[in-house]
Amino acid sequence: MNKKLYSVMNWPEIEGIVYAEASNPFSLLGSHSIKEGNLIQIFRPDAVAVAVKVDGKNYELEKVDEAGFFACLIPSKKKKLDYSVIIEDVKGKTISYKDAYSFDTFSKATVFKNFFAGMEYKANEIFSPKLTSIDGVEGCLFTVWVEDAIRVSVVADFNNWDGRIHQMEKIDDRGIFQLFIPGVTAGAKYLYEIKIRGQKVYRKFDPYAIEMSKKPEDCCIVMEDKLEANIVKFKTKNSDAPIRIYELNLDAWSKKSEAKTYKYLANDIISYVKKVGYNYIDLMPVAHYLNDKTYGYTTVSMFAPSSRFGSPKDFLEFVNEFHKNGIGVIIDWNCAYFGTDARGLDKFNGTNIYGGLKPILEKDETWDVYTYDYYNNCVLSFLYSSLYYWIENFSIDGIRIDSLASMLYLDYGKEAGSWIPNIYGGNENLAAIDFIKKVNKIATKEGIITIADETSGWIGITKTFDGDNLGFDYLQNKNWTEEYLNFYEQDPLFRKGLYENLTFPMVYHFNEKFIQKFSSADLYGTGVSLYSLAAGKDDEEKKSDLRTALAYLYFYPGSKMIAFGQDLGFDMTNPAKKEAWELVDENRENYIKSLNGFLDKYADVFKNDNNEDSFEWLENNNATETVLSFARKSAKGKILTVVFNFTPVERKAYRLFVCEEGKYKECFNSSLKEFGGNLAKTKTVYRSDREDEHPDARKFIDIDIPGFSAVCYECEAYTEEEIEENKILKEAAVAKKNAEDKAKIAKELATKAEEEARVALEAEKKAKQKADEAVRAKEEAERKAKEAIKASIRIDEETKLRLEKLRAKLNLVDDKSKKSTSKRTKK
């Protein structure tokens, strides 16, 4: 080795470069002006020979270390040389390029001021790879934040994924590394290689990557700064009107439709969504992810749309197509937690600088995730910037934040002793609460809606930002769903025991601005569908019960969300069952279309959802028959009366009490033939009546309610003429009834009198007969008496004769006796 060259080289620093442990490679590599001339040092482990071209002249570099360290002294006193590097690699190929270490222009510290303060809303413009030109040379500026790293390198297809070739310069002690690499163009694939204490090396995705490659490469892609596409804005609906959201997972839909690109997915989804009448879609996480089992919730790139279906530009066109068709696009923006994918944010610098709390999620206890560290300002800037990026670059119309409870509470899903209380000794995550409020303020400013998936019962989710209120636009009503599904899956015979499940949610309904839902969180991936849970002895009854459940969702106050496939009664998600769609008949689509159209037709009624006066129970105490009814009212007095029969038994002549006098005409019936039922449309008008004439007397209509059904009636109030007519008719009816009652009484009296007369005549006839009998009896008695007198006289005469004879006989005997005695005396 040239002794002069040997003497000017810093061998300890060279060792740091060779072992790839240099955090300041610019202090050694590149061109450096020294008193002996200009020292050029190049480290290319993949080269067998290296030369530099300066001012048209080539200079061979000496290989001073077998690891691939080359150096030479050039007789030049210029502080900054303009040179090119020429290498011959191990395959004999000659490559010429500009040396990255000849461009020592770095970002100033002021660029990162807001980032470290947690106030940077466009951190992606700082950290995402930036195609730029320095000194007339085109290339890409790479910037990354990695605290406590010994060395960070750009590894890419342009350096054969060798982390020793492009070691980055640490330009800020707080962990900012930067390197401009000449010649890098859009489409280059790269990762960051991070070396930490203990000699461990990690290859990580760029947290700010705005495009990702498809499997199996799994790397980041350098992309143009701007998406070269026109953004089509969507006019957000009046926030007072309930929105109807179709929730779907693009991967599941692609399996159903075999559409594998954003373009064809858009065409296919729009065709269905527009046909049946939803006005929003909610995309389960569309930001890039690796683990299909988590349905996208373990996001690995908070800025890049999933590459499964195309590029970021393709996704923008996807959103544009929905906007052109009047459909808003909401995305699940997962700022609550991140997964443990090896190339993701987990242990990004060997420790979790992006977060460290490890919750057990209610969504899926098997998911291995960490919550973000909301106390770290750099993490806040990262998340705020992600939100702005999706809003400004893709014109999304709303976000849904999943598992909000895991953000709000330090002890969420954790064992005692594994978490640290806040400064007040409580379990609230104060930094996360402030972060959530800030997110909602940003959303309000940008005109997008925010939806919370929160299950802990936090008060004030959708209230303004005072105190603990968080400021969301909507809260998914998981309790309503659980209560209803627990009721719904029961045999109809036992539903009466859970009747209160239907009525209790109204106790708290007006405390928040709710979305009622049958969403992925309730049914996704379980293989369970609304149809499979439905009651009924046969397919016809189960479909009727399904239609009743969907109607209950739609008529109940609040916005609506329903998961992909469940609106038709199928589980399409685990995996998406293409064959299920072959079972979809026109009736099912007509039904959900009719429900969505009904909300549009009666928009004045349903946009009054958040007003307590918009709802009135009419029947909420009939568990025995399991019939439920309520009224929905508009601010202008329009009234819809809805009645539900949750059993298969038809309720004939059911007396339904109503809140308004008027004419009730059926405007919806889930049992119509066009929906798969067996009833034809009816034009029957039910005129309300009162129980009595008192002004406060309950008003009612008598109706027939089909089994497993939902029926809605539109009330048309009586006109003054009809009121007077009703009065006259009622008075006439009362008079007629009175007359009829009197006639009935008179008839009854006449019948009674006639009966009494008949009885009297009968009695008279019987009396005469008895009198005749008595006369005859008297005559007979008199005759018999006469005969008896005669007999008595005769007997008396006979007796007298007999006595006389007896006396005569006795006298004769006596005379004889006396004579005999006299003779004996004489003797």
Image: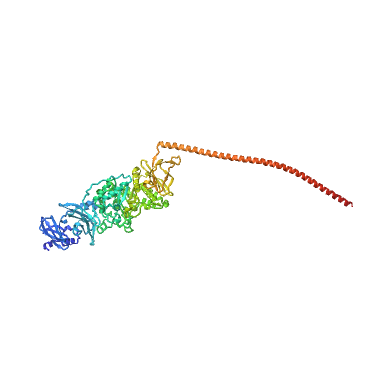
- Res. 120 visible in picture: no
In the foreground, 297 or 655: 655
- Res. 164 visible in picture: yes
In the foreground, 316 or 127: 316
Q: Position of residue 188 (x, y in %)?
A: 20, 54
In the foreground, 753 or 590: 590
Q: Quadrant of residue 37?
A: bottom left
In the foreground, 749 or 727: 749
Q: Position of residue 404 (x, y in %)?
A: 31, 52
Residue 733 placement, left or right of 168: right
The image shows a total of numbered marks equal to 0
Q: What kind of colouring is applied to the model shown?
A: rainbow
Q: Quadrant of residue 169?
A: bottom left
Q: Position of residue 768 (x, y in %)?
A: 63, 39
Quarter in which the N terminus is drawn: bottom left
Residue 6 placement, left or right of 528: left
Q: Position of residue 411 (x, y in %)?
A: 32, 56
Q: Residue at x 88, y 51 (%)?
A: 823
